[in-house]
Amino acid sequence: MNLGEVFSWITSQALGHQLRDKMHVFMCEEDGFDGHTFLFISTIDYGGDFKILQADYPSFLTHDSYISLGRPVCYSDADLNSYTKQQVGQIRKDHLQQLFHAVQGSDTMEARYIKRVGNALKAAL
């Protein structure tokens, strides 16, 4: 997987929900602390999320949406292998650059994830 690739699969990791189909934006591979790290794409801005326009991503968005700047979701290799993933798109480099700045200024994402996701997004700068 590469930075900014967008995948869709049914997950139980969406807080407050049972199994549901969610779009995930890949940030980085697992390390000794966290699993493979993704940010969700949501239809609702939960406060300070990063807006992406349907017009920019018509192949996978049916309306304007948001890359969540809340808590990233992390999966182990075993978790990822248990899902039927479909790659549906790629976030543009200029949007990854803007996302970097949004993450750095986030007041909803935990500091350790700001560092983790920010370090991954530096590759787009």
Image (tube, grey):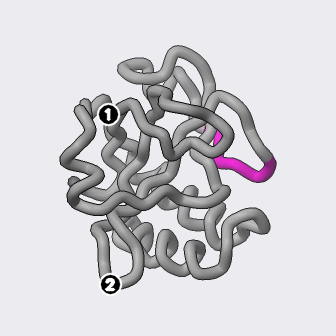
Viewport quadrant of the N terminus:
bottom left
Give above or below for 55 relative to 87.
Answer: above
- Frontmost residue, 22 versus 95: 22
Question: Residue 44: x, y in percent?
Answer: 71, 32
The numbered mark, 1 or 2, whose residue comes first in the sequence reads 2
Q: CA distance from mark 1 to mark 2?
A: 28 Å
- Frontmost residue, 71 versus 99: 71
Type of residue at label 1? Gly
Kindly indicate the quadrant of the structure image that contains residue 24: top left
What kind of element bears circle 2? loop
Span colored in magenta: 47-51
Give above or below for 23 relative to 50.
Answer: above
Residue at (75, 63) in percent of width and height: 108
Residue at (52, 15) in percent of width and height: 62
Labelled disc at residue 116: none
Type of residue at label 2? Gly
Q: Is residue 110 left or right of residue 11?
A: right
Q: Is residue 27 left or right of residue 63?
A: left
Q: Is residue 122 left or right of residue 62?
A: left
Q: Nearer the viewer, mark 1 or mark 2?
A: 2
Q: Quick check: is 121 in the magenta stretch?
A: no
Question: Residue 70: x, y in percent?
Answer: 66, 57
User: Disc 1 designates what residue?
Assistant: 89
Give above or below for 57 relative to 11.
Answer: above
Residue lying farthest bottom?
32
User: How dense is the environment of label 1, judged by Cα within 10 Å: few (below 14), some, or many (20 and up)?
Assistant: some
User: Disc 2 designates what residue?
Assistant: 32
